[in-house]
Image (cartoon, coloured by chain):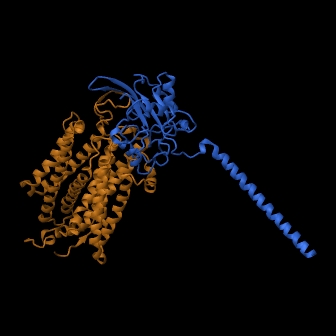
Chain colours: A orange, B blue
Amino acid sequence: MKKINYLEIEGWSGKLLGLLAVLGLITLAGLGATYYMEHHGHYVTGMNNQIVWGMPHVFAIFLIVAASGALNVASIGTVFGKTIYKPLGRLSALLAIALLAGGLMVLVLDLGRPDRLVIAMTYYNFKSIFAWNIILYNGFFAIVIVYIWMMMEGKMHNYYRPAGIVAFIWRLILTTGTGSIFGFLVARSAYDAAIMAPMFIIMSFAFGLAFFMLIILIGYPCMGRPLGDKTVKTLKNLLGVFVGAVMYFVLVYHLTNLYGTEHHGVEKFIIAGNTEFTKIFWILQVLVGGILPLVIFYSKLSNSRKWIGLGALLVLIGGIAQLYVIVIGGQSYPLEMFPGMEVISSSFGDANAYHPYSPSLAETLLGLSGIAVAILIVVLGSKVLAFMPTSLADKEVDPHSKA
Amino acid sequence: MNNQDSSSDGISRRKFLAAGVVTTAGVSIASGVSLLSIAQAKPADQSVTDKQRWGMLIDTNKCAKGCTSCVDACNHENGLDRGDEQHSRPDQKAHWIRKVELKDKATDHTVSLPLMCQHCENPPCVDVCPTGASFKRKDGIVLVDKHICIGCRYCMMACPYKARSFIHEELNNQLDYAPRGKGTVESCTLCVHRVDTGGTPACVEACNTAGHKAMYFGDLKDSNSDVSKQLKIHSSTAIRADLNLNPGVRYRGI
């Protein structure tokens, strides 16, 4: 393989300024929405005492999961020695940090008391997976920054593989922690499942890679830098495997619920109910986020980069839908406190067949601003530091290329 | 001799002075100790121990359908009825205790019961709280430290009884012993301010006043307490007993 040259994004093109302006506006809208929600209190949101985590958590968890997955591209190059992935390592690590920052911003700004962030950093209950996650997220920032430094600094090149291995192991633990936020919950029927942790890991593989592919599929032509078919096809095939793997985990999760009678209620609610969750599950999560991308990636459509880009976008839309079904759908189903009994009346909604949730505009804006912040960090990071190779042409990245 | 006498006199003076200092110090310390011991004698200053475990038995056979005396008393006692939550929707308003009516699907038998924080021995809310704001006192009462609650609502996700409420708006006009705050989580305190001064929770008192006497409160570790005697005579169960949380609140008749 030739020596790869990296370069900052050059100049201030109209496209770049336009992109920064749009991202800046979405970020400002998200901050404005936060001020509105924190000033009034959460009564202006669609959340309540049953659906305690709403749209911001859907986006926050989606971004945090995608963050650890985005680092995979670097890990495949560094840890598993796949040559074609090595030039993508720096950008992969930057995207991982950016997505985590965007996700955590949303998570923190949706707290009841975001002003008490310092308490979250100084008071730890080590039996809480949430507390562990705070350590895992902060550690991820530190480890990936060191990893980036070692990738960029020639003198440190001998240490970059150990750093990459540590980052890879850390990210697996981190996503296990994120999945366990739900996996460890015994109270609600949709959760309390050990499969949540590995399912979140495979989800992270898919979402992170889809994000990464969109960045290079859109970014490289805009910058006028070559992007070879070899890189695109390799990533596309890998994403297809990840999407299939996510569908497998979803299948096993639902089969397990279908087998055990005690889970029939919540299972019917999600896969065969009369609510929006059933529609979101089948149409957005399974069809749009799973089947369509697989059709695109493994048919002649994949000869077109626009179709591949669309496939990656559909994976992300399906990912948000999947987290909506897990986070909101899982809470919407009533708590099963009295097996064999029917709740006739309750002043606190225990008798409801399910709990509806309508996200407010402010919540959605806060969630979207997390994505905007993540892209903003990637663009600005690549503007000031050399994260992106000057060329990802086949002859640059693949030693066996005939081109 | 004179010299010796004078030296002997000198020692005496020193002894006298030393004795004086020791006596003064002793009196000072002793008075401090005695003040301290008086302070310790105040019930409010005594630390909570695990010699007690406060708990409750609810006899659903006696709980009257449609009666909300316990709920009304709780709301009044803890300031939930002060009309502060004007903007919150019904599903956003705080509920520390609620009445639930159930029907057995197989037999059509109906029961009525109050449901609140079950003050578990192994509370999931305490396990998941990242900052330790959710905590269990040694005497079994589960509380929220409003000063370090960051409003993450993970405890609400973890509670199998939906016993916790999030405050969705600014609150004013609060009671000194039941502080509440926007952006934090709260739940039944078992009227800890009453229990610590030898009283019973407001809901139990109201149920007795209403003549139903469906709620027994007391020390589960004291075999002579009313609640322990009742639990020994008749069978009872915990809600979600399968979770093995050993709640401090038990039910008869469900």
- Seen from this angle, which residue lies furthest right? B2
Which quadrant holds residue B27?
bottom right
Residue A211 quadrant: bottom left
Up-down: is A52 above or below A92? above
Left of A124 or right of it: where is A306?
left
Locate residue A352, reporting x and y percent: 31, 30
Q: Please name the residue shown 40% across and 26% down the image.
A: B60
Q: Nearer the viewer, residue A138 or A254?
A: A254
Quadrant where the C terminus of chain B is found in the figure: top left
Q: Left or right: B166 with respect to A199?
A: right
Q: Nearer the viewer, residue A382 or B161?
A: B161
Q: Quadrant of residue A189?
A: top left
> Residue at 23% of width from left, 45% of height from top?
A321
Task: Please count the marks in the image.
Answer: 0
Above or below — where is A140 with respect to A316?
below
The residue at the point 40 percent across, 24 percent down is: B61
Q: Is residue B197 above or below residue A99?
A: above
Residue A188 visible: yes
Tell whether A351 sits left or right of B88.
Answer: left
Location of residue A139 in the rendering, given as x and y in whole percent from the top left corner: 36, 62
